[in-house]
Image (tube, grey):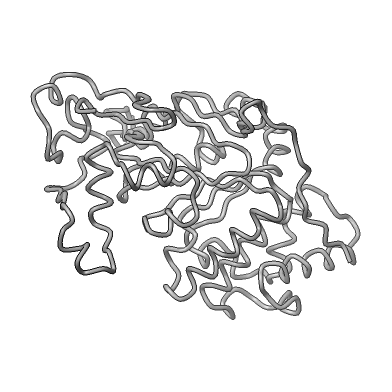
Amino acid sequence: MVSTFAQPQTTTTSENREVLLSVKNLKKHFPISSGIIFQRQVGAVKAVDDVSFNVYRGETLGVVGESGCGKSTTGRTVLQLYKPTSGSVVFEGKELTTMPAEELRKMRRRMQMIFQDPFASLNPRMSVGRIVSEPLRIHNIIPNKKEEQEYVEALLERVGLNPYYVNRYPHEFSGGQRQRIGIARALALKPSFIVADEPISALDVSIQAQVVNLLEDLQDELNLTYLFIAHDLSMVRHICDRVAVMYLGKIVELATTDELYDNPLHPYTQALLSAVPVPDPLVEAKRQRFILGGDVPSPANPPRGCNFNTRCPVEFGLCHEEPDPELIEVKPGHWAACHRV
């Protein structure tokens, strides 16, 4: 049976961390057009606006923030599912943004995505076996039909599904099982990098921990690297090595998980963490709350100055006058974008 999933080991840098993905000044603006016949651009939705970060091989980088802050768009733009407006995305030493289509198609074997909705991301007219084997057929990985079926069955078994499910269809499975099918499909080409776009948000709480534990086991076994997009801050703390906090298309803070949760510097990060309930009622009663007013501004018309000044509890004059603050390294490995820091 063909069941070899192990990833090749690679050498690391002198800091014992190899940069697998490097994103610099990434922007994704969606045009706003006016007119029925002769359309002209009258503005742009700045979904991702000058984002930079590195992802190291073998780590899990979490991306958190409110809905509409650009998390999912960042993940899709990194994988070139959306063509970036500008910026650089270097994966395994190769620039993706200027790569020819055929070469990019081959690179997609090394980077995959787990989608948020496990039902909408699976073709209801295709059997589970066909869904998982489709990437193999597209890239002509295993021409032999028998070996292909054995490989698919081994994949299903690895993600916790009965290999005899190959002939069933997505509607016959629960949400957690469908997400496992999506994970098996993402693993089929033996990628080194996976963007997990809120992979547990559509699942029952009882199933979420099972899927997260599966992702962690697969990471250890296959030497995978994750960009983990999520809303659940407690789950992010459990699975992620570092966390990037996004607000209105920009990263406002980036640090190791323990450092970010123990010493948040940006007011937005502090507000997000203060909203996470603590099981101990004595600790909960003594916690300082950062309650934000209003709604997230439109990315088509961001506020003048700092993007966060309309909701920030500690804003002052400079926040309205100066351009959006740059992300600076306040201490080794801890970055923040705030005039108060």
Left or right of 267: which side holds 66? right
59 sits left or right of 290 in the view: right
Where in the figure is residue 304, as x and y percent of width and height? 17, 26
The image quadrant where one finds the C terminus is: top left
**Residue with the most extreme left position:** 317
Task: Name above or below for residue 310 compared with residue 27.
Answer: below
Task: Specify the quadrant of the image occupied by residue 11.
Answer: top right
- Residue appearing at x 37%, y 30% in the figure: 335
In the rendering, at what x and y percent does residue 339 appear? Answer: 21, 25
The quadrant of the image that shows the N terminus is bottom right
Q: Nearer the viewer, residue 175 or 313?
A: 313
Expressed as whole percent of the image width and height from the top left, the position of residue 338 reads 24, 29
Residue drawn at x 67%, y 62% as measured from the top left = 184
Q: How many marks?
A: 0
- The front one of 65 and 125 is 65
Residue 302, image quadrant: top left
Is 228 or 144 nearer to us in this picture? 228
| Image height of 210 relative to 77, above or below | below
Q: 116 or 284, which lies in front?
A: 284
Name the residue: 52% across, 65% down: 118
What residue is rendered at 59% in x and 59% in y? 215
